[in-house]
Image (spheres, rainbow, N blue to C red):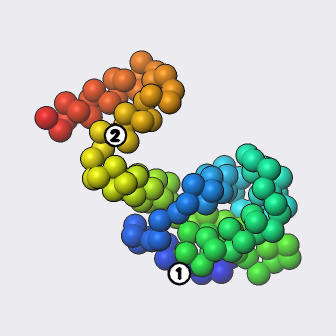
Amino acid sequence: MAKAKNTTNPSFTPLSEGEMELLDLLWKLGPAPLAAVHKNYSRPVGYTTIQTRLNRMVDKGVLVRSADYPALYEAIVKTEIASGSFFETAAKISGGSLVPLIAHLTEKRKLTAEEITLLKDLIAKHE
């Protein structure tokens, strides 16, 4: 695999929702060719659209593309860095407050008892 521009810096360019979906898919698949990424993508999106997004993510330094044919795309940024950047951006949109973000996320789906316990523990830790 080719060297990436930015493998450890948590301040990389924030990713779009579609790019986050592709990153998550590559974390699950491991190094994969464009055809496999396109086939396993969760929504109907054009092949060239996926290719463009993957190449932009290489430019952003979150993926590497091999010199092989067909080229393999591989995620090189850690989950914590990508999700942290994504959530920081979401918090900024909420005026810097985490409350609207958490409220939105918890209204969209039912929390498990384990998730509720973890959230309570986090709150208690910061009180």
Q: Residues within 10 Å of mark 2 (few under 14, many from 20)?
A: some
Q: Residue furthest left?
A: 127
Residue 45 at least partly seen = yes
Q: Nearer the viewer, residue 40 or 64?
A: 40
> Considering the image in quadrants, where does the N terminus appear?
bottom right
Residue 88 or residue 79, whichever sits in front: 88
Q: Position of residue 30 (x, y in %)?
A: 69, 57
Q: Regarding mark 1 in the picture, which secondary structure is present there?
A: loop
Disc 2: which residue: 100
- For mark 1, does the 10 Å Cα neighbourhood hold few (<14), some (14 to 19), or many (20 or more) residues? some
Residue 76 image point, x, y percent: 57, 66
* For residue 93, above or below residue 101: below
Residue on which disc 1 sits: 5
User: Residue 125: horizontal and vertical position, in percent?
Assistant: 19, 35
Give the quadrant of residue 49: bottom right
- The kind of residue tagged 1 is Lys
Q: Marks 2 and 1, how far apart in space?
A: 34 Å
Note whether 25 is above or below 46 in the view shown. above
Horizontal arrangement in the rendering, residue 86 relative to residue 63 (left or right): left
- For the residue labelled by badge 2, is the local secondary structure a helix, a strand or a loop? helix
